[in-house]
């Protein structure tokens, strides 16, 4: 699902989304205008994700900044996170993630 328009618009489908525990790997690379809230919602729907690739994503600096501890909270089984060349991720977030 690389390079799609996922995360550009806000949708309120929370009541319609069921958890999908079968998904273990998500490659969301090369998304422009990606909202951190959309990523968190997706991770709540797919709570068993072990590998998450966000290579070259440009996160929108909206009210809810990309926060790596929140990502880890949403996906407790995450063992691999690729944020290389992603934008609007703070260095503090990288430091927190590298300490884990």
Image (tube, grey):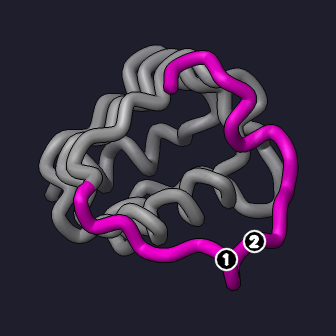
Decide whether the magenta segment is chiefly helix, strand or loop: loop
Mark 1 neighbour class, 10 Å CA radius: few under 14, some 14 to 19, many 20 or more: few
Q: Position of residue 89 (x, y in %)?
A: 55, 38
User: In the shown orientation, is residue 1 left or right of residue 7?
Assistant: left
Say what secondary structure mark 2 lies in: loop
**Residue at the bottom extreme of this rendering:** 15
User: In the shown orientation, is residue 83 left or right of residue 15?
Assistant: left
Let me know if residue 36 is in the magenta part. Answer: no
Magenta residues, as a range? 1-22
**Residue lying at 43% horizontally and 20% vertically, measured from the top left:** 55
Q: CA distance from mark 2 to mark 1?
A: 5 Å
Mark 2 neighbour class, 10 Å CA radius: few under 14, some 14 to 19, many 20 or more: few
Relative to 5, say whether 69 is above or below.
below
**Along the viewing direction, whichever of 18 and 82 lies nearer the viewer:** 18
Relative to 79, say whether 29 is above or below.
above
Kindly check if marks 2 and 1 are in contact, taking CB atoms under 8 A apart as contact: yes
**Residue lying at 64% horizontally and 34% vertically, measured from the top left:** 88
**Along the viewing direction, whichever of 22 and 99 lies nearer the viewer:** 22
**Residue lying at 18% horizontally and 51% vertically, measured from the top left:** 50
Query: Which residue was labeled with disc 1?
Result: 16
Residue 33, numbered circle? none
| Image quarter (top left, top right, bottom left or bottom right) of the C terminus | bottom left
Query: Which residue was labeled with disc 2?
Result: 13
User: In the shown orientation, is residue 37 left or right of residue 66?
Assistant: right
**Residue lying at 42% horizontally and 55% vertically, measured from the top left:** 68
């Amino acid at each position: 699902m690389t390079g799609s328009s996922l995360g550009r618009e806000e949708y309120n489908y929370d009541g319609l989304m069921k958890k999908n525990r079968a998904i273990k790997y998500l490659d969301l690379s090369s998304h422009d205008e990606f909202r951190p809230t959309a990523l968190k919602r997706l991770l709540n729907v797919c709570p068993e994700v072990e590998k998450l690739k966000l290579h070259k994503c440009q996160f929108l600096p909206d009210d809810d900044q990309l926060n790596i501890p929140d990502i880890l909270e949403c996906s407790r089984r995450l063992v691999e996170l690729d944020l290389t060349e992603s934008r609007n991720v703070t260095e503090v977030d990288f430091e927190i993630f590298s300490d884990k």
